[in-house]
Image: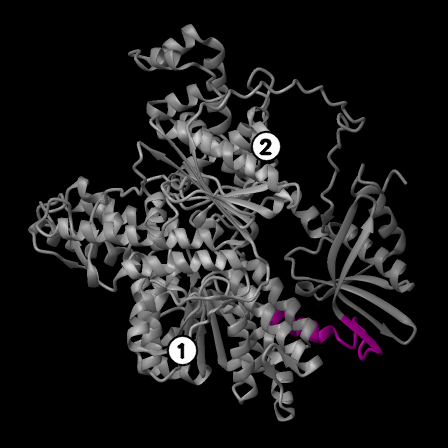
Amino acid sequence: MKIRVASAGTGKTASLVLRYLELVASGTPLRRIAGVTFTRKAADELRVRVGEALEDVLARGRHLDFVCAPASRPRLEEAWRELPGATLATIHGFMIECLRRTAPLLSLDPDFSLIGDWEARALFEEEWRSLLYLSADPAHPLFGLLKPEMGDAVLHLFAKRSLAAAYTPSPGEENATLVKAYEAVFANYSRRLGSGVLSSSEVERKALELTANPRALKRILARYRIVLVDEFQDVNPLQGQFFRALEAAGLPVEAVGDPKQSIYAFRDADVEVFRRALAEGEVLPPLTTTYRHSQVLVRFLNRLTGKLAALGLGFGPEEAPPVQGARPVRGRLEVHWVEGEVTLDELRTLEAQILAQRLQALSERVDPSEMAVLVRSRNSFAFLEEALGRLGLPYVLLQGRGYYGRLEVRDLYHAITVALDPRGLSLAAWLRSPFGGLGLAEVEQVLRSADPLTLLQAEFPEVYARLRLIQQTVSQSKPLEALKFLVRAPILEGRAYFDHLEARSRENVDALLFQVAARPPSSLEVLLERLRLLSQQAEAGDVPQSGEGVQLLTVHAAKGLEWPVVAVFDLGRRNSHLPQPAYLGPDGAVALPETPVCDELRARAKAREEAESYRLLYVAASRAKDVLILTGSVRAGKPEGWAEVLAKVGFGPTARFFDRPDYVQRSWNYRPVPPSAPPAPKSAPVAPPWLERVFEPLPLPPLFSPSALKRQAEPLPLPDLEEGEEVPGRARALGTLVHTAIAQGWNPDHPDHLATLEAQEVMFPFDPAERTSILTEARELLRGYQALLGKELPWPRDEDYPELPLALPDGPTVWQGVIDRLYRVGEEWYLEDYKTDHEAVPERYHFQLALYYKAVREVWRVNPRVRLVFLRWAQVVELEPGVLERALWQDIPGCGYGDR
């Protein structure tokens, strides 16, 4: 494997684009190159950049350092044509493409579907609970071994399964039992997914299985000649193993990345994968010219990375080559420390105030929307919002705390929960939310009662009545309708829950409604389980806030972005190390807390987190283009967190004071920040004249079809209880086959035509006997149609248009449909509709044919003879123009026809 280190701002994407041009020019077709990166956004950007480079070369003969030789031009032209279908994807996207190409060899359905991580966790958790229940049977092989308290550790292993192909227990009986339990649950989970469903981690495992299958590998090697991987520092161990296996099989892999920016351990990224490639592969010259940073920031970043590398903090010297700046801009660095003996929160309040003042001063020459403030913890946002709001400096919170943990989302979760079961913590949360509106003392009074609902009815009758209304409405509604009721209904003293929310919270609630509408759960219980599982994904950000101003976001969310002015706030926040249900070591070793090697693995995990925190600081500092402001709070002269790191580099609280145009280093003694003045009352906005306008519902949808109108008056087929979808009935399948064959002109006695009909998708739900029966009936109907040709149905034809689609705007509705056949014989036009009905009732179709007749007359300016062909009865019924005209007036009163 060829590997290259590329520091922040040194043009990784540009180097990849140049490599594409070199490969294509030297004879490797674009379709044989796989471009792989970390996110869909990055993959889309790479596709655009490659396209722009190809256009540049074809127009000017060169792009950056690449000069096109005349002999290479046809290859580059071919690459430009192939670009829309070229493989430029995420790692999982590339793996999925490889799996679909080799699916039969891996016992996979080529059309396998994908499920999200939360869905996979839900299925695995169900299997764990099932196994826990079954293992209580003395005959079960795991009888007496499994305990409910093992659940967190089992689920933790499932969440981290991308770190190892298999787990091995560390010394200790408890560890062996844990791994045995996990393997049993995972086996059941895998059987449940079968060959047609994969989650992201299972995609990785199947991709590894592919690399162990010679026939499957041969297909991939025949398809691709080289793989180019961007952001290689973000791959996990299974992904790294996959790329190494491709390389070993003879498929060259070239990777570029920056180990100093490996900050996604919570997503299972492991910088050791990159380091192994550095140690074992062919190391290409690093990219050392930064096109992002000003001269002062280049010097600062070189000093920061050089010192950390020398100390072995986060990365080594070979991963941190010094860079040179390509921009002549001088730039500016500011470092501000706030010191005192008060609490850190008090120090942070002053720190935020100082930072806000500096941003306000800079806003005279830099627009606030070109500034960003980065934090490592979302808990720091509150200090910034208060300080910026005090100065009236506009800001937008681009990445808040976990979306599914937002208070407004949890309010709706608890409201649905109490509608189904008004007890426990959800009842307490509901009473405290705007739905209940009770204070803490009142909530405690209700919950301490032997019968909370009875006391609620006696002491707070309005709240109880609201609870009963929510129970009655929500419990009888579908999930989306239940959410819409909770959000929009004016049940809170004449106001809706939506009216109680700030703008940001409203955007989050709207996003939840859109999400549920896009993937509606089958029941309220399924919706609650989905929200519960998603709330455990802390990295799920909330909806980006709209508007302009200083952008507030976490360092993780800022990865890959840049701004002219960047501030890093709250450098004094210490590192936190949360306990884990189980600890993982190299090669998948597993240890529970309190087992023999747990201390060793816990220390290893802590060291990895500390190392990543140093890399996180580099990512934060390298987002700035021109101006970088660093602020931190130090209590009692003891710097912690990143403040301690900067002290080691020489920029700590005790560093020498500077106040130059390009460099400021200053410490501030604590002083209380005066309280904010209450905001001036806003005058009530004048209501626009259209605010109270009510749009009356239309009698029909804006887009409708005659067939749908007819179905409204007929009973619907019973739904499939498992799938929740309408099953294609025999009549529908038969009609589809007959209409397809007539449109294509197929012979009912031709074996190939019959085989093609049997392969139609509408036949999939039926067993072989049913398919044979349907096909036999279709053949008889088609024979009847053939017998009518040249007799009741004119043949041959001068012009013939089968399956002619139409869209007819008429009043408030656009009617859509398909004319079975419109044709001309001599000077006569015919419009025909073919029916497979068991009863010949022409009146059913008067309105449908009237619309078709109207459309043909208005658009084609011809007056066709309109005929219904009942194939089962070999009967042709011609509809007179007067009958059709009356059908438009009489069939749909109030829909715009009878009023004209």
Residue 362 lies, with reference to residue 271, above or below; the image says above
Q: Amino acid at mark 1?
A: Leu
Residue 283 x/y as whole percent: 36, 77
Residue 723 lies, with reference to residue 35, above or below; the image says above
Chosen colour scheme = one colour
Q: How many marks?
A: 2
Inspect this view and state whether residue 170 appears: yes
Labelled disc at residue 785: none
Q: Residue at x 72, y 53 (%)?
A: 841
- Sequence-earlier tag: 1 or 2: 1
Residue 110 lies, with reference to residue 309, above or below; the image says below
Q: Residue at x 36, y 43 (%)?
A: 643
Q: Which residues are magenta?
A: 779-801
Secondary structure under the numbered disc 2 in the rendered image:
helix
* Mark 1 or 2: the one toward you: 1
Q: Residue at x 32, y 75 (%)?
A: 244
- Does 448 appear in magenta? no
Q: Amino acid at mark 2?
A: Ala
Horizontal relation, residue 750 to residue 317: left or right = right
Q: Give the quadrant of residue 264.
A: bottom left
Residue 746 x/y as whole percent: 65, 78
Residue 400 x/y as whole percent: 48, 40
Residue 767 x/y as whole percent: 43, 65
What residue is shown with label 2? 503
Inspect this view and state whether residue 209 appears: no
Horizontal relation, residue 531 to residue 575: left or right = right
Horizontal relation, residue 106 to residue 786: left or right = left
What residue is shown with label 1? 284
